Amino acid sequence: MALAHPKNALLRWFAAGALLIAAGTPVSAAEVKVITSNALRAAYLELVPQYEKASGNTVNLIWSPAVDIPKRVEAGERADLVILPAAGVDELIKKGILVPGSRADLVKSLIGVAVRAGTPRPDLSSGEGVKRALLASKSIVLSGGTSSFYLLDLFQKMGVADAIKPRMRQYGPGSGLGVGQVLARGEGDLGFTQVSEFVEVKGIDYVGPLPPDIQQVTMFSAGLFKGAPSAEVAHDLVKFLTAPQAGPVLYRHGLEPV
C-alpha cells in the first residue's frame, strides 16, 4: 500500500488532535523532547518559546551538529521528534527507528558566504566569481557539518581543491566553533556554511548565498520516533513550526518556509 505524502500524514494527525480539543477533551500540559540540528538554533529559539506560551507545553531542545544526529540515534538516544536533513529522516525510517510516513518537511536552508569584517566581498553573481574568490583568499573556513560535504566535492569539480587545500581550515562538530565565530576572531578571511549560521554572528560581513549555478538547498525535516511518549504534542509542535506565522521568523534567521 502506498504511503501518503509525509507532511500530509502528520497534518491528518494534527487535524484529529484539533477535533478532540474542539470537542472539549481535556488536554494536559506535557513535555516534548526534540533532537535537532544546530542550523535551526536561532529561529527555533525564537519560535519555540512562542509555542510554549500558546500551548502550555514544554519543549526540551537537544542541539547537535546534523552530521552527528544519525550516529546518536542509531546508538540508542531517543526523543519524541528528530529534526535533520530530509535524507537522514528517510534513512532512520528505513532502519525502523522512526514512524513510517511521519516525515514532515520544515524549512529549506541555503549555503551562504561571509568574510571577516572589512575584507573585500567576493563576487557571488556566478560560480566563476566564487572560484576567483577562493583562489585569491588567504584563509578559507568550512564547517564540519552538512554543507562541507557538498563544498569539498564542489571545489574538486571546480578544479581548485589542490590549490586551496593549504589555506583551508575545517571545524568539526567537536570544536565548539562555527564558521562565523572563526571569521569574527580574525582566524579566517572567507567562510562557507548554512546561511542561518551566519545571520546572528557579530564581527563578520555576510555577503549572501552561493549563486544558483552552484547552490545546494538542504531540506530540514522532522520525524517521529516509534514509541514516542509525547507523540500528540510532537504533532502539535510541528504544526506550529510550519504554520504561516512562522514564516517571517524563519526568513529573518536565514531559512525559507516549505
Image: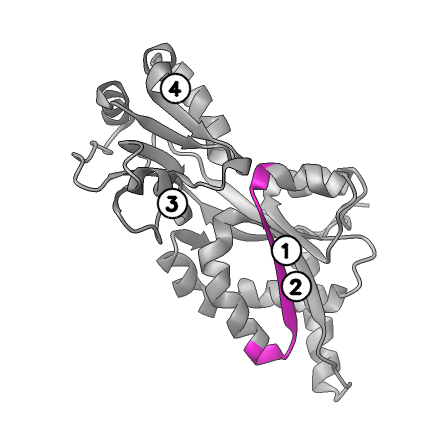
Between the residue at mark 1 and the residue at mark 2, the CA separation in whole angstroms equals 6 Å
User: Is the C-beta separation of discs 1 and 2 under 8 Å?
Assistant: yes
Residue toward you, 133 or 185: 185
Q: Which mark is residue 155?
A: 4
Residue at 50%, 27% (x, y): give it: 149
Q: Which residue is mark 2?
A: 11
Q: Tell me the mark number nearer the camera, choosing from 2 and 3.
A: 3
Q: Earlier in the sequence, mark 3 or mark 4?
A: 4
- Disc 2 on helix, strand or loop? helix
Type of amino acid under label 2: Leu
Q: Which residue is mark 3?
A: 195
Q: Label 1 near label 3: C-beta < 8 Å?
A: no
Q: CA distance from mark 2 to mark 3?
A: 28 Å
Q: Amino acid at mark 4?
A: Phe
Q: Is residue 165 left or right of residue 242?
A: left
Q: Residues within 10 Å of mark 3 (few under 14, many from 20)?
A: many
Q: Does residue 117 belong to the magenta stretch?
A: no
Of badges 4 and 1, nearer the viewer stands: 4
Do labels 4 and 2 touch, CB within 8 Å? no
Q: Secondary structure at mark 1?
A: helix
Question: Regarding mark 3 in the picture, which secondary structure is present there?
Answer: helix
- Under mark 1, the amino acid is Lys
Residue 7 disc label = 1
What is the distance, in whole Å, between disc 4 and disc 1 at their CAs? 35 Å
Mark 4 or mark 2: which is in front? 4
Which sits earlier in the primary sequence, circle 2 or circle 3?
2
